[in-house]
Amino acid sequence: MRALVALAAVTVLLGSGCGTTQRQTVKQSPTICGFLGADLCQQLQPGAREEAGLRYVNPKGTFTQYDKVMIVLVGFFGSDPAKVPPKDEQRLTDLFYKNLHEALAKRYQVVDEVASGVMKVEVALLDAETATAGARSVTMVVPQLRVLSTGYALAAGRFPFSGGAEAAAKISDAMTEQVLGAAVDRRAGGGSVDAAAQWQWGDAENAIKVWSSLLANGLYAYTSGEKKP
């Protein structure tokens, strides 16, 4: 049995577990529906492995008409104020905006005014959890503990002492407010050694980087015509 656990752990280490984040199951909640709206919330469906945990794409959306984006970052929405101190909340919000702006600017012109051809991208952090920094670093670096922590991740669905975050996004036509799509995703710290030595919000930061890239690349797949809604 121990050999099987060790083999499974090594398999995860060599595979998807080596990422800086792990996608977690997203559970419908009043917070999600409060941000997206009840009607849109009900249309969310599970995403594929490389997509958000829950997502919606408007089948009638004419995505190829858009070449600009307007970013509306709400910051934290509906989360427990006691979980994230105000200074860290602001730091994570600023970090999200910076990463999202950089990722979208590679694909689109980023604007701050409503106009034709502009998508409004509204994003909110719904939750964030700190990692136990010292313990997380040790379990990722020491080989024996790394195998044990990977075995734990197989059973529990996340690595021990890891942090994480949850975010939601709504994309709409900036002029008409027609909803084009929505996504909700939750991530915890992954098994990559790159995620070991970091500050307590490092896993949340890594999740923000992944979301920014996923959102920019996912949108571009539709606006470029590569994918059809």
Image (cartoon, rainbow, N blue to C red):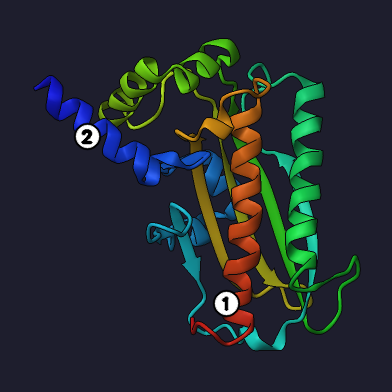
Instruction: Estimate the x, y position of residue 1 in percent, counting from the top left.
Output: 8, 22
Taking depth in this image into account, of 101 and 25 the one nearest to the observer is: 101
Which residue is found at the position 55% from the left and 14% from the top?
132
Name the quadrant containing residue 106.
Answer: bottom right
* Res 153 quadrant in image: top left
Secondary element at image label 1: helix
Residue type highlighted by circle 1: Ala
Q: Position of residue 15 (x, y in %)?
A: 35, 46
> Across the whole image, how many numbered discs are drawn on residues?
2
Note whether 49 is above or below 142 in the view shown.
below
Question: Which residue is found at the position 45% from the left and 16% from the top?
Answer: 142
| Residue wearing tag 2 | 8
Q: In x, y percent, where is residue 179?
A: 61, 71
**Residue 78, visible in the rendered structure:** no
Distance, label 1 to label 2, CA atoms, is 35 Å
Is 205 on the left or on the right of 137, as rendered?
Answer: right
According to the image, label 1 marks what residue?
A: 221
Residue at the outermost left position? 1
Name the side, left or right, on which 112 lies relative to 147.
right
